[in-house]
Each structure stands twice: as C-alpha cells, then as structure tokens.
Amino acid sequence: NAGVTQTPKFRVLKTGQSMTLLCAQDMNHEYMYWYRQDPGMGLRLIHYSVGEGTTAKGEVPDGYNVSRLKKQNFLLGLESAAPSQTSVYFCASSLGNIQYFGAGTRLSVL
Amino acid sequence: AQKITQTQPGMFVQEKEAVTLDCTYDTSDPSYGLFWYKQPSSGEMIFLIYQGSYDQQNATEGRYSLNFQKARKSANLVISASQLGDSAMYFCAMSYYNNNDMRFGAGTRLTVKP
C-alpha cells in the first residue's frame, strides 16, 4: 500500500528558480492538500482540492500555485522561489474527515 | 478562523506511565472535528485519533484516548502505558464539517524515559 507519495524528498533551489512538487495518492480520495511546516510551528495549509479540476486557497497561499488535472495527483508549484519558502512540505489526502499524509519534502531555497 | 493552542512545548513521562497532552481551541461554530497526529523523528505525520463535536462519548483508539470537554473547548490526548516508541511530536488539529481547512497547534514534544 503506497498511500500518499511525494516526490522529490529533498530539493535545494536558488532564489528565483521554479520547481514543482508532485503528490500522488492511490486511495481514490477526493480531497488533497498541500501544507508547509516551519520550525516550532504546526502545519499550515497552502492550497487544497476537493476534486479533479478544482483547487482552493488555504491559510498561506501566496507564492504557490497548484493543479489537480488527475484525481490521483496534486501538484504544487513555486514559480520564483524565495528563501522564505524554505520549509518542509507535506501532501495529504482524505475521503472523509481524516487526512493521510505523505512523508514530506524538505526544500531549501538559497 | 479557528485557533488551536498547545501550551506544553515539551513533556517527559516515565515508561509505562500515562501522560496527558493539552489542547484547547477557539471557535464559535458548533460543527467541527478534532484530531491528534504523531510526528516521530523520521518526519511523517501519523493519524492517531478523531473526535467529532457532536460525539457523545470520548474517542478511544488502543492506548490513545481523547478527553473532550466541549464547554471548556479542550481536547486533551491521553496516552496510557507509555512506550519508548511514543517519543515524538504530537499535534492537535481542528477542521469544520463544511470545509477542509485544517488548522494545527504548534505541537508538544513528548519524551518517554526508560
């Protein structure tokens, strides 16, 4: 059971570079989410999706874009990375109330 | 937006003893769910337990129980018979029934002593 898979696991970017984080789930869940976790803080919701082709803003959406072209995939994009986006990024999916998380992506922006 | 407060940055407990991790929340909406997640040093987020705001009984899952006091707006996690593997960060979270915007507390780091 793969569950929620995030790629890559680690990435280092230079300021101004762009990148896309991929989240894939094999549980046929309708809802998917992207969070960031900074030191000393809980997770904060960036964007989420309630179904294929739909996305919505969360608590901290600025500087990020997302797409949900297929039900099983949820992409998080950084168009012009900034040092403030150095963080650990988590993807999650849910069918009902409970969210199931991927292992995380550690991103450093220099 | 809902606010989650975990006032204990760190907690210590002796192996085999019980420990309570505190969580309070602030909301005026009557329909919500409360969650606890465990984050070991490896980094993944592991779902532990869920409590709905209309549930009449406190949730239990194995050694985990949620002490839900709705009037006080608290949802404390109780871990019975602590094990060394329980050492981790623990996060309390909340979301409303009508949306998926989950908010997390800052977490409590639990250390189980042998």
Image (spheres, rainbow, N blue to C red):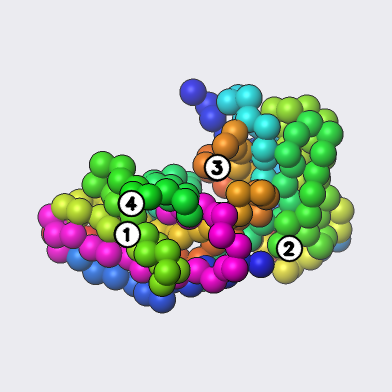
Q: Is residue B64 left or right of residue A109?
A: left
For marks 1 and 2, give the CA distance: 31 Å
Disc assigned to residue A80 = none
The residue indicated by pointer 2 is A60
Give x and y (percent) for residue A73: 72, 32
The chain holding disc 4 is B
Whether labels 1 and 2 belong to a single chain: the reply is no
The residue indicated by pointer 4 is B58
The chain holding disc 3 is A
Give x and y (percent) for residue B94: 54, 57
The residue indicated by pointer 3 is A97
For marks 1 and 3, give the CA distance: 19 Å
Crowdedness near tag 1: few (<14), some (14–19) or many (≥20) residues, C-alpha within 10 Å: many
Circles 1 and 2: CB distance less than 8 Å? Answer: no
Range shown magenta: B14-37
Q: Residue at point 55% right, 54% down?
A: B32
Amino acid type shown at disc 2: Val
Give x and y (percent) for residue A107: 66, 55
For marks 4 and 1, give the CA distance: 6 Å
The residue indicated by pointer 1 is B67
For marks 4 and 2, give the CA distance: 32 Å
For marks 4 and 3, give the CA distance: 17 Å
